[in-house]
Amino acid sequence: MREWTQRELLERTEQTEHDGSSFAVFIYTPLCGTCKVAERMLQVIEAMRPNLPLFKGNINFMPELAATWQIRSVPCIAAVRGGNPQALIYSVQSVDALDLRLSEFLKIKE
């Protein structure tokens, strides 16, 4: 999972507005234990789906994005399409549940 800066995420978000693409971004803080568990789950999903458009970003360096997207807490996985987050996922129950939700929002085929 590649780490993106706020600028890169805002540029990519703008791009989705024009080309209709989608991606997910895992928003975290480095000292959050739950974030580490969620990141590990996402790494498992990424291993199962290597072409998954999934990135990560440290919320401490994204104040504008956090305010614009109204991120309430971390970990948060934002599914972005059409220039806006279509879903903010705060609950990371299991790898299967998370994979299903990401697949639905990102329109991923088996």
Image (cartoon, rainbow, N blue to C red):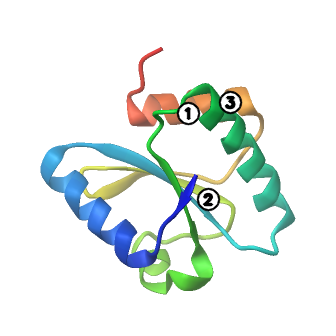
Q: Residue furthest toward the right? A: 33
| Secondary-structure class at tag 3 | helix
Q: Residues within 10 Å of mark 2 (few under 14, many from 20)?
A: many
Marks 1,3: beta carbons within 8 A? yes
Circle 1 SS class:
helix
Q: Determine whether label 3 and label 2 are within 8 Å by CB.
A: no
In the drawing, does residue 107 fall left or right of residue 95? left
Disc 1 vs disc 2: Cβ atoms closer than 8 Å?
A: no
The residue indicated by pointer 3 is 97
Q: Seen in the image, is 35 located left or right of residue 46? A: right
Q: Residue at x 24, y 50 (%)?
A: 82
Q: In the rendered image, which residue does mark 1 sit on? A: 101
Q: Which residue is mark 2?
A: 76
Q: Amino acid at mark 3?
A: Ala
Residue 81: image x %, image y %?
Answer: 31, 48
Name the residue nearer the viewer: 65 or 48: 48
Label 1 to label 2: alpha-carbon separation: 13 Å
Q: Position of residue 3 (x, y in %)?
A: 54, 64
Specify the amino acid type for callout 2: Cys
Compute the Cα span from label 3 to label 2.
Answer: 15 Å
Dividing the picture into quadrants, the one containing residue 6 is bottom left
| Percent x, y of residue 62 | 50, 80
